[in-house]
Image (spheres, rainbow, N blue to C red):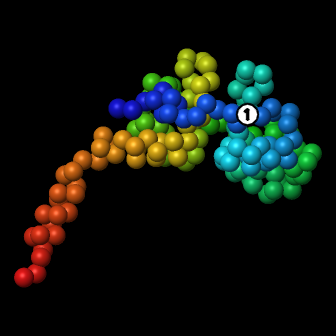
């Protein structure tokens, strides 16, 4: 089984950090620059939360706040599900489904290691499709087609 640690190792080293004191407008510029849907909010070496496009929509736009006066700390997500680096991709998929989230926070002991996204998991499944999907389904489809052929 593939683990969170393996998913994190396949990802590029994170560079999408922002301070909780940054303005939302700055965060939006950073999101655009890194071409990702979220930023990791760090205060020094302390993980504080994530700021995502969804946070912007729900906590800034829909609440009538201004991007140039609202701080990231006021609108970021802090209540995301946590996973351990030894958890499996399957456990992550279950947690994403259970919590209806796009992001999981990965920890080793109490140290923040990174964010696992639903896209990370899908990429891992696709790259490991031989570990996930076997040829039996394809063979069943071929057999079914041949059994139902009209002569």
Pick the front one: 96 or 36:
36
Report whether residue 24 is seen: no
Image quadrant where one finds the C terminus: bottom left
Q: Residue lying furthest left in this view?
A: 151
Say above or below: 109 vs 11: above
Circle 1 packing at 10 Å, graded few (<14), some (14-19), many (20+), is some
Report whether residue 139 is seen: yes
In the picture provided, is 69 more to the left or to the right than 42?
right
Q: Residue at x 66, y 36 (%)?
A: 79
Pick the front one: 32 or 109:
32
Query: Percent position (x, y) of residue 47?
Result: 70, 26
Residue highlighted by disc 1: 17
**Element type at marker 1?**
strand
Q: Residue at x 36, y 41 (%)?
A: 128
Pick the front one: 68 or 63:
68
Q: Which corner quadrant of the image does residue 49 belong to?
A: top right
The mark tally for this picture is: 1
Q: Which corner quadrant of the image does residue 41 belong to?
A: top right
In the picture provided, is 76 more to the left or to the right than 130?
right
Q: Residue at x 91, y 48 (%)?
A: 68
Image quadrant where one finds the N terminus: top left
Query: Percent position (x, y) of residue 86?
Result: 45, 24
Q: Residue lying furthest bottom in this view?
A: 151
């Amino acid at each position: 089984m593939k683990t969170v640690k393996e998913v994190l190792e396949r990802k590029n080293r994170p560079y999408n950090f922002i301070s909780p004191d940054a303005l939302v407008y700055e965060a939006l510029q950073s999101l655009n620059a890194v071409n990702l849907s979220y930023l990791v909010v760090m205060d020094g070496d302390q993980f504080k939360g994530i700021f995502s496009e969804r946070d912007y929509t729900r906590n800034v736009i829909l609440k009538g706040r201004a991007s140039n006066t609202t701080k990231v700390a006021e609108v970021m997500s802090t209540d995301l599900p946590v996973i351990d680096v030894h958890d499996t991709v399957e456990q992550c998929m279950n947690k994403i489904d259970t919590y209806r989230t796009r992001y999981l926070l990965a920890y080793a002991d109490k140290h923040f290691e990174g964010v696992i996204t639903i896209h990370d998991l899908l990429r891992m499944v696709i790259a490991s499709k031989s570990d996930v999907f076997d040829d039996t389904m394809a063979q069943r489809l071929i057999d079914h087609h041949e059994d139902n052929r009209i002569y």
